Amino acid sequence: MSDPSSTERQVLDWLSGQRGEMLKLLERLVNTDGGSYDKAGVDAAGAHIRGFLDANGIAAEVTPDTKFGDAISATVRNGGGNRPILLMGHRDTVFPKGEPTRRPFRIDGDRAYGPGVADMKSGLVMNCFVLAALKKFGGATAPVTALFTGDEEIGSPFSRPVIEQHARAARAVFNSEPGRGPGAVVTGRKGGVFMRIEITGKAAHSGANFEQGISAINELAHKTLALHALSDPPNGITLNVGVVAGGQTVNTVAPWARCEVDFRFITPADRRATMAKVEAIVAKSFVPGTSAKLEITGEFLPLVETADNQQLFEHYGACLRDLGNEPKAIFTGGCADSGFAAATGAPTICAVGPVGGRGHTPDEYMEIDTLVPRAQALALAILRLR
C-alpha cells in the first residue's frame, strides 16, 4: 500500500491483532436471540454491544421504543469541525425465537455459521472495533458515529426517523451489511414495498346454496395473476404474492381471503407508476360483489446510484486497493437501511461489512478471513476522508 501515516499504521496494526476478540464478540451476538419482533432479544444483543463500547471508553446513547429494539448510537470525537461520519448496522434477524439454541455459532474451516452471522452481526462487530480503534489512536478529521438499530428486517418502522436524523447531519454513510466479495461494495439497491390485501366476499353453503356465495378466494386468484402481470424484470420491477390465506371450510364459499405482496423497484418514479396500477387492481372487482382493501405494512427506499455515492465508493475503493483488493461496485435487488440514509442526501455506500452469504437461511455463513481486512478498509476510509 502507499505509505500510511503513523496513525493509520497504528490503527491497521491494532485491528490486525483483534481477530480473536472479534470472533468472541461475534459469538456472543450470534448466540443471542434477535428476531425483529423479539424486543427483549434484540435489546440483549444491544447490551453486548454497549458492554464492549463501555469497556473501550465509548459512551452510548439509547433511543428507546416500547415495541421494537432500542436504537443505540455511539460517537468518537477526535477533533475537527467536519460533519460526522455515520456507520450503520442492525441487530435484528429474520429467525424465530430459540434459533441460536437450535444452531449456535460455530466455526467450520474458514467460515463462521449461525443465525445472523453475516446479516449482519459480523458487520456490527466490525463497526464496534473500528470505533474502538479510532478511540484508541485518533486520526479521524470528523466525529464518527456508529448507529445500531433493531428493526431493519421489517422495514425499520421505529428506526427509520432515527436513521434519517443521523444521516441528515452526516458527510458520509457506510452501511456494514455483508460484503459480496473481498472488494465488492453495493452502490445501488432496489426499494421495496410490503403490502397486505384483504378481500371480502360472501359465505354460502357450497352444495345447497352455491350460487348465493361470492368467493373471495376466486377474487384473490384474479388479483394474484393481475399483480404478477405488472412485473417487468428487465426494468427492475417485480411483484411477488408470497403469502395467501382465506376461506372458512371446504364446503363453504370463501367469505374472505388475504395475500401479502412484495413489490421491488429501482427508482421512485417506478414506485409511483406501479403503485397506481396496484391500487387499480385492488379497487377492481373481478368477481362481482367482492371488495378489497390495501395496506402498506413496510417499505424500503431505494439506494439510488448518484454522483456523490460514486465519489464515496471511489474513495473507499482506493483504500481497498491499497490493502490489496480490487474494488467492484454492485447493484442488488435486496433492500436495506442505506436507502433511508441516501434519500436524505448523504453520500452513502452499502455492504462494506465482512463477506458472507446465504442470508436468511440455515446455511448462512461469514468468511472469517475477511473480518479484519474489511475493518481495516473501513477504518482507512474514515481516516482518509478530508
Image: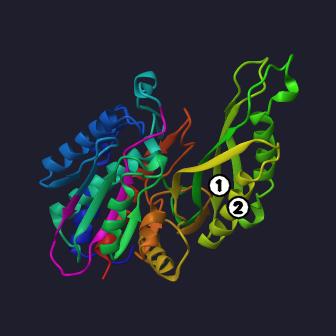
Q: Earlier in the sequence, mark 1 or mark 2?
A: 2
Q: Which residues are magenta?
A: 74-95
Q: Please state the horizontal and vertical placement of residue 171, each as a whole percent of the image.
A: 33, 77
Q: On the image, numbered disc 2 is attached to which residue?
A: 237
Please report contact status of discs 1 and 2: CB closer than 8 Å, yes or no: yes
Query: Judging from the image, what secondary structure is the residue with disc 2 in?
Result: loop
Q: Please state the horizontal and vertical placement of residue 349, each as a whole percent of the image.
A: 46, 68
Which of 248 and 116 lies nearest the eye of the viewer?
A: 248
The N terminus lies in quadrant: bottom left
Q: Which mark is residue 57?
A: none
Q: Does the stretch in magenta take in 254?
A: no
Query: Judging from the image, what secondary structure is the residue with disc 1 in?
Result: strand
45 relative position to 201: left or right: left
Q: Please state the horizontal and vertical placement of residue 142, each as a whole percent of the image.
A: 23, 75
357 relative position to 219: left or right: left
The C terminus lies in quadrant: bottom left
How far apart in space, not on screen, are marks 1 and 2 (Cα)? 7 Å
104 relative position to 70: left or right: right
Q: Please state the horizontal and vertical placement of residue 91, each as a whole percent of the image.
A: 37, 45
What's the residue at 40%, 42% (across, down)?
A: 92
Label 1 crowd bin: few (<14), some (14–19), many (20+), radius 10 Å: many
256 relative position to 43: left or right: right
Which of 23 and 101 lies nearest the eye of the viewer?
A: 101
Q: Amino acid at mark 2?
A: Ile
Q: Is residue 244 visible?
A: yes
Which of 215 and 234 lies nearest the eye of the viewer?
A: 215
171 vs 63: above or below = below
Q: On the image, numbered disc 1 is attached to which residue?
A: 263
Q: Amino acid at mark 1?
A: Phe
